[in-house]
Image (cartoon, rainbow, N blue to C red):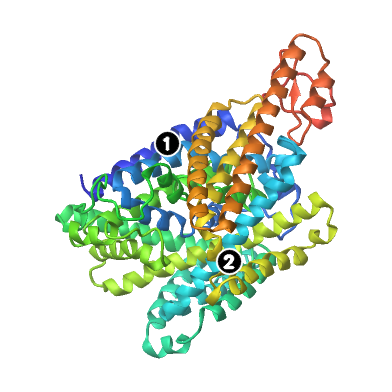
């Protein structure tokens, strides 16, 4: 077994999963493609700012780069501590059967309900009691994401001034691409590739000593102020001006880097290069002190790359408002998660092969001497940066390894910045929906909601800790919060499918697996933080687990109601309009005389005949 064999076998499995299981889930479970194009939110609510019909290729790039971020890089780079086999199995099987099902469901559910977020939909799919708490939970998760990602990006900019020019030049380049494409009808592909060439040129220029000296001495706090000012502007601009073009450029950055990595793997395989040799054990039986148990913490450590609650916010927060046809949902919702799993596989092989470490002793010195799940971001990424540059150097031997390491670093920072851009916009939506839920009308205003989102994150980052590290106060529990959000999303989706008469097994089994795993991890972490006297972390985890328990109770109550209504309707104990009223909500479920729940066409009235199952 070598790195090339792992990559080829994983790629084949992921492709088969997309082609067969993805098609089954898209058509049989969610009915993706049934909604006429003119009824998708991007067309029915088009406003040129948030609701914008977008070509599949462009939206795929935006969605993929946003959900990826640094997550599928950091998680696998840490999780190989337990060995490459557990990490690989969770990434490949998790993305096919859990993560992609979760992402596609969140996208389709939002598209079917005017582009509303999953948190907002919880009121109608389950009960209104859940809505405010679920939205507040999402807002808290995004609050931490914004503060921590800002700190990470600011720290990288301050410590690696050679990357500054390439990172910031992307902003005017993206604005230029947006102008040339949407106002002057130019080719998005051509202009984004030209922008990518300019970015790579900026990497070379930015590494010149004279240029790097311009940014030497800029502190983390300085970059934090710059970043928060930037994301405020980026989140209120129309998506076609900055967000879409920047994400499209970043997607090409990643695809090019992955292509060179794969070519390097092929070259090493053809020439018998040592880079393909695995230096890490399949299962590591020499874990470092401080490393948590493989179960349940492998499933928390690798979130993006297998399943992540953050993805539901992207799918139902921004992507659903740009999807131009529901027929594109499988490629974007399911396909992006499959490709993210592929990225995580590449990270795994970079971190366990001779491309990144000279021999097993070098690997053990990194992964068995100390737990790498704590500390700075760069410490966790050294394996991927070194291994990735090693494989790229096999394909491009005329380019120095040091330059290729900078290229990979710029890709990582660009992804993190993209996640921060979109997270700010999504937080605006969540704050607006929270304002509507609690009756604060002022929060419906775009700038008011954005200002609150940015100001609160900036306050956490800058004032709650030293040197801009305030977000790290809550970061130790973010992994569990993120996976709790995925559990809750699967619960909402399962309830939604049950009310619509759709098969629920495809979401219910992943939901049960995650609920047991994440709850176990949460309880163990609560015990650990009680022992350490970290009561603020105990409180956050207790709130999350309490919300999960509450929503499970509400979900089972909804299932019982749906079953009772169908049984009573079949027994002629209630009328069809009464059954419809019992399952009222934005899904507009209609139950026919046989007790089968169908889509409701409002124009047809309450007495519509049985139609196509929605």
Q: Choose between 368 and 542: the one closer to the eye.
A: 542
Residue 62 in the image: x percent, y percent? 55, 57
Left or right, 115 with respect to 482, comes to right
Q: Which mark is residue 17?
A: 1
Picture quadrant of residue 196: bottom left
Helix, strand or loop under label 2: helix
Residue 483 in the image: x percent, y percent? 53, 46
> Can you say which quadrant of the picture contains the N terminus?
top left
Q: Going 72% across and 66% down the picture, which residue do you hit?
A: 452
Mark nearer the N terminus (1 vs 2)? 1
Q: Is residue 412 above or below residue 208?
A: above
> Can you say which quadrant of the picture contains the C terminus?
top right
Residue 54 in the image: x percent, y percent? 62, 53
Q: Choose between 264 and 302: the one closer to the eye.
A: 302
**Does the CB distance between marks 1 and 2 fall below 8 Å?**
no
Residue tagged 2: 147
Left or right, 580 with respect to 228, comes to right
Number of residues whose C-alpha sits closer than 10 Å to that of mark 1, classed few (under 14), some (14–19) or many (20 or more): many
Number of residues whose C-alpha sits closer than 10 Å to that of mark 2, classed few (under 14), some (14–19) or many (20 or more): many
Left or right, 106 with respect to 195, comes to right
Q: Is residue 283 above or below residue 276?
A: above
Task: Looking at this view, name the residue that lies furthest to the left.
Answer: 272
**Separation of marks 1 and 2 at Cα, in angstroms:** 36 Å
Whether residue 587 appears in this view of the structure is: yes
Helix, strand or loop under label 1: helix
């Amino acid at each position: 077994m070598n790195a090339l064999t792992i990559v080829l076998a994983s790629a084949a499995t992921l492709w088969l999963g997309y082609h067969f299981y993805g098609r089954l889930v898209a058509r049989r479970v969610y009915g993706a493609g049934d909604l006429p194009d003119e009824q998708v939110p991007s067309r029915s609510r088009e406003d040129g700012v948030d609701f914008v019909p977008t070509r599949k290729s462009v939206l795929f790039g935006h969605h993929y780069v946003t959900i990826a971020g640094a997550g599928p890089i950091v998680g696998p780079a840490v999780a190989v501590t337990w060995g490459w086999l557990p990490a690989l199995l969770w990434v490949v099987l998790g993305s096919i059967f859990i993560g992609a099902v979760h992402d596609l469901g969140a996208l389709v559910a939002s598209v079917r309900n005017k582009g509303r977020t999953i948190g907002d939909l919880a009121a109608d799919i389950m009960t209104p009691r859940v809505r405010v708490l679920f939205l507040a939970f999402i807002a808290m998760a995004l609050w931490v994401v914004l503060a921590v990602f800002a700190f990470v990006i600011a720290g990288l900019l301050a410590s690696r001034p050679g990357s500054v020019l390439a990172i910031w030049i992307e902003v005017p380049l993206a604005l230029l691409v947006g102008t040339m494409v949407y106002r002057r009808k130019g080719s998005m592909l051509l202009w984004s590739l030209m922008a990518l060439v300019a970015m790579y040129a900026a990497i070379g220029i930015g590494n010149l000593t004279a240029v790097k000296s311009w940014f030497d001495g800029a502190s983390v706090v300085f970059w934090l102020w710059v970043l928060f000012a930037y994301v405020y502007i980026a989140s209120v601009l129309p998506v076609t001006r900055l967000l879409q073009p920047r994400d499209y450029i970043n997607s090409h950055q990643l695809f090019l880097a992955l292509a060179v990595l794969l070519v390097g793997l092929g070259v090493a395989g053809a020439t018998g290069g040592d880079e393909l040799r695995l230096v890490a054990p399949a299962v590591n039986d020499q874990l470092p002190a401080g490393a948590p148990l493989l179960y349940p913490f492998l499933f928390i450590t690798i979130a993006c790359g297998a399943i992540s609650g953050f993805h539901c916010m992207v799918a139902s927060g921004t992507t659903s408002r740009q999807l131009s046809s529901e027929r594109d949902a499988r490629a974007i919702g399911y396909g992006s998660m499959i490709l993210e799993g592929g990225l995580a596989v590449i990270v795994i092989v970079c971190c366990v092969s001779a491309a990144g470490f000279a021999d097993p002793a070098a690997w053990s010195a990194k992964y068995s001497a100390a737990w790498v799940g704590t500390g700075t971001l760069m410490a966790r990424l050294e394996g991927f940066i070194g291994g990735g540059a090693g494989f790229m150097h096999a394909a491009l031997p005329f380019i120095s390894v040091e330059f290729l390491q900078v290229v990979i670093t710029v890709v990582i920072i660009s992804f993190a910045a993209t996640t921060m851009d979109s997270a700010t916009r999504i937080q605006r939506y969540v704050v607006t929906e929270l304002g509507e839920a609690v009756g604060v009308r002022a929060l419906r205003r775009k700038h008011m909601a954005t200002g609150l989102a940015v100001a609160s994150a900036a306050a956490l980052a800058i004032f709650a800790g030293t040197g801009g590290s305030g977000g790290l106060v809550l970061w130790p529990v973010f992994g569990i919060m993120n996976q709790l959000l995925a559990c809750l999303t699967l619960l909402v989706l399962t309830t939604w499918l049950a009310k619509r008469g759709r098969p629920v097994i495809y979401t219910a089994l992943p939901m049960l697996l995650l609920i047991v795993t994440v709850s176990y991890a949460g309880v163990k972490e609560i015990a650990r933080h009680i022992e350490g006297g970290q009561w603020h972390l105990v409180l956050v985890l207790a709130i999350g687990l309490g919300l999960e328990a509450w929503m499970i109770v509400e979900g089972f109550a909804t299932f019982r109601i749906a079953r009772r209504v169908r049984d009573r309707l079949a027994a002629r104990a209630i009328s069809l309009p009464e059954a419809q009223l019992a399952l009222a909500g934005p899904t507009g479920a209609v139950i026919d005389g046989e007790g089968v729940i169908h889509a409701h066409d409002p124009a047809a009235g309450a007495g519509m005949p049985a139609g196509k199952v929605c």
